[in-house]
Image: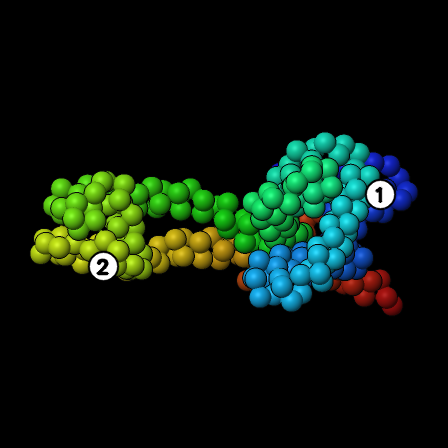
């Protein structure tokens, strides 16, 4: 995490802290899995409740389930706050804010008269799904993905900035070539057309009428096919790099200087030298014992 959390005191608060905020014990792993399942079920209930056919038939069940999950997540948040030494650090973090927002709409109905009319507030409960992102930081594979995202962020932002410039250029060009009757009424509307064309979606609501405009559209579509794999390649390269760094050690062999050993390796792959310079080679100990024997 980007913020440092610590348990409030020894005893129950420390034990709860290790279960809730860590994942290196069976209890912590069981808590994470149970929390993910609860989040997914609660989000599924919200999604199904938005379908009129299901809401009319199972509306009362969805109502009780939503309140049950509201109570569960409220209790979970209260326990999180209880076991922390400085709860304000967590509450000011992104995931702390998401936790509060996720349970706020349910209690808002009780505190604010007529809050049932605030339909838009109920959508905030879908933010519970983002709580899974926090749990990813406690999973090895999740840490690799997050590390790859952080490393590739600058390249991806540069890529999207370049795409935005290309879209703006083609939009201005089409706005000049095509007539408003074809749908190119403004540069922003032309940018919408350029994005739809570059992503090869092709809604068909804005279509060039001139031959030159159609030729430019073809070029833009071909560019979309050629660059669609760029962010995927950048992210994949960073994932591979993270996996290698997580698996291999950067420390060089004291014997031959080879530096591509697995972190669990005890002897050099090339020359067989003992890699841990802070401890003695067990083979030498055995040799000394054998020499001392009569």
Q: Which quadrant is home to the N terminus?
A: top right
For disc 1, the neighbor class at 10 Å (few under 14, some 14 to 19, many from 20) is some
Determine whether, in the image, residue 279 is placed left or right of residue 185.
Answer: right
**Quadrant the C terminus occupies:** bottom right
Between residue 185 and residue 240, name the one nearer to us. Answer: 185
Near-viewer residue (48 or 36): 48
Q: CA distance from mark 2 to mark 1?
A: 58 Å
Q: Secondary structure at mark 1?
A: helix
How far across and down, in percent of the image, does residue 191 sit? Answer: 27, 45
Q: Residue furthest left?
A: 211
Q: Residue at x 86, y 42 (%)?
A: 13
Q: Earlier in the sequence, mark 2 or mark 1?
A: 1
Residue 196 in the image: x percent, y percent?
30, 54
Q: Quadrant of residue 28?
A: bottom right
Q: Residue 276: x, y in percent? A: 68, 52
Residue 156 position, x and y percent, is 40, 46
**Mark 2 sits on what residue?**
222
The mark found on residue 14 in the picture is 1
Q: At 39% across and 57% down in the image, what residue appears? A: 233
| Residue drawn at the location 67% of the way across and 65% of the way down | 58
Nearest to the eye among marks 2 and 1: give it: 2
- The secondary structure type at the circle numbered 2 is helix
């Amino acid at each position: 995490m980007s913020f440092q959390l610590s348990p409030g005191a020894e005893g129950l608060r420390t034990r709860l802290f290790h279960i809730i905020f860590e994942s290196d014990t069976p209890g912590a792993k069981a808590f994470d899995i149970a929390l993910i399942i609860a989040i997914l079920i609660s989000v599924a209930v919200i999604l199904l409740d938005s379908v009129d056919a299901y809401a009319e038939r199972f509306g009362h069940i969805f109502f009780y389930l939503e309140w049950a999950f509201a109570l569960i997540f409220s209790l979970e948040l209260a326990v999180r706050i209880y076991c922390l030494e400085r709860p304000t650090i967590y509450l000011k973090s992104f995931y702390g804010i998401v936790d509060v927002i996720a349970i706020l709409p349910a209690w808002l109905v009780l505190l604010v008269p007529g809050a049932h009319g605030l339909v838009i507030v109920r959508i905030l409960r879908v933010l519970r799904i983002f709580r899974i992102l926090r749990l990813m930081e406690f999973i090895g594979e999740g840490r690799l993905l997050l590390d790859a995202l952080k490393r590739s962020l600058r390249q991806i932002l540069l890529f999207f900035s370049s795409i935005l410039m290309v879209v703006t250029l083609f939009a201005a060009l089409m706005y000049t070539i095509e007539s408003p009757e074809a749908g190119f009424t403004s540069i922003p509307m032309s940018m919408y057309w350029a994005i739809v064309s570059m992503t090869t979606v092709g809604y068909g609501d804005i279509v060039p009428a001139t031959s030159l405009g159609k030729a430019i559209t073809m070029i833009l579509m071909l560019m979309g096919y050629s660059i669609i794999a760029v962010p995927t390649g950048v992210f994949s390269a960073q994932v591979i790099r993270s996996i290698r760094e997580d698996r291999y050690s950067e420390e060089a062999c004291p014997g031959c200087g080879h530096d591509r050993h697995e972190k669990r390796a005890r002897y050099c792959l090339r020359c067989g030298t003992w890699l841990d310079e802070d401890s003695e080679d067990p083979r030498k100990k055995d040799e000394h014992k054998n020499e001392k024997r009569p």
